[in-house]
Image (spheres, rainbow, N blue to C red):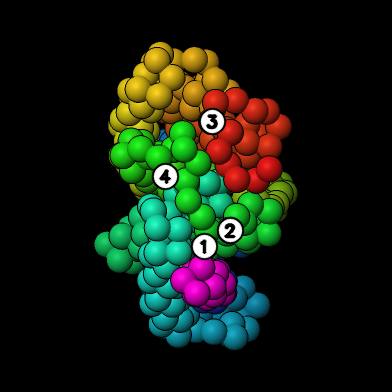
Amino acid sequence: MYSSISDGLMVAAVLGYIVAMVGYAIEYAFGRQGVVARIAARTPRQATKVLVATDGTEIPVVDDGEDDEAGHRPPVDAGRAAMIGRIALGVQTVAAAAHAACLVFRSLAAHRVPWGNMYEYVLTACFIATVAWLVVAYKRSSVRHLGLFVSLVVAILLCLDAAKLYATAGPLVPALNSYWLIIHVSAMTVASGLFMVGFVTMSLYLIQERREHALAVEARARRTDGDDYVERPLRFPLTLGERLPAAESIERLGFRLHALAFPIWTFAIMCGAIWAEHAWGTYWNWDPKETWSFIAWVVYAAFLHARATPSLRGRWSGWIAIVGWAVMMVNLFGVNFVVTGLHSYAGVG
């Protein structure tokens, strides 16, 4: 009974995240968030302020208004889009509550904490990611519409989780029946959820940073060529940057998420080593899961180091963060599906 309720709540949570994603998409498309102008489409008199790119070039920034360049009124005005964004945030909050209830009923069905296999691990990590984003969105309404991308990643992972990783609720395998499961795996899931949101924000940062650079180059070319200048329109994914906050703001948010997640990941690895000594008589076995967890730790340590180094801060550190998430995905999916080892408790056969 509890298992069926948990499964139903999981479906409800996914549907809620999808509905929230649609609402965020409307706010993203039609909201009043600051838009870096396509310089060729605006005259200097229309600029209300300037954005200084990373290389010092000033880029005109305009109020996007409610009409497009041809004078046509968009289907949703900015005020209504903001209201839809607030509704989307509320829907995502309700979906997160259903997600939390899903984990509670899963725990009741299994008579243990709800992270004893791969299905439950992903389920919990996605919940942590959602809660982390809700905290950010409620504190900084200016980035609320970026919930579109967080909801997208969470919904995709949960759908994959239900379709490919689902395991019937049941007791733990003997090797996991320890209080260290609560300490070690809970820390892993919290860090993974934070890294997930950090990955989304750093991906958006790289898009916006590249877009700001392209606009800076365009501004210099316009000043140099004058009337002979030929506009080169931006292409996807740089066009996504039109509704993104400034690159520096996104990067700062991504850094804070990673800076919070990294010590938790470090703590989780240390707890895992202590648990390994209790269970197997040695602190480290270079098991595939241990190895890839350590590789992820090294990559994220490199990210924090690069971010603190002026010559590497920005695009280089951003790409290191992306590599870190790729390593996390190898550790989660590749290790569990492709190789076997001492951590083969995924429950996926």
The residues bearing labels 2 and 3 have C-alpha atoms spaced at a distance of: 19 Å
> Viewed as shown, does residue 172 lie left or right of 255?
right
Q: Do the residues labelled 3 and 1 touch (CB within 8 Å)?
A: no
The residues bearing labels 4 and 1 have C-alpha atoms spaced at a distance of: 18 Å
Q: Is mark 4 on a helix, strand or loop?
A: helix
Mark identifier at residue 168: 2
Asked whether residue 313 is drawn in magenta, I would say no
- Say few, some or many: other residues with alpha carbon within 10 Å of mark 2 (under 14 / 14 to 19 / 20 or more): few
Q: In terms of secondary structure, what is the magenta stretch mainly?
A: helix
Q: Is mark 1 on a helix, strand or loop?
A: helix
Of 194 and 228, the residue lying toward us: 194
Nearer the observer: mark 4 or 1; the answer is 4
- Say few, some or many: other residues with alpha carbon within 10 Å of mark 1 (under 14 / 14 to 19 / 20 or more): many
Q: Do the residues labelled 4 and 2 touch (CB within 8 Å)?
A: no
Nearer the observer: mark 2 or 3; the answer is 2
Read off the magenta span.
1-16
Mark identifier at residue 189: 4
Residue 4: % across, % down: 54, 73
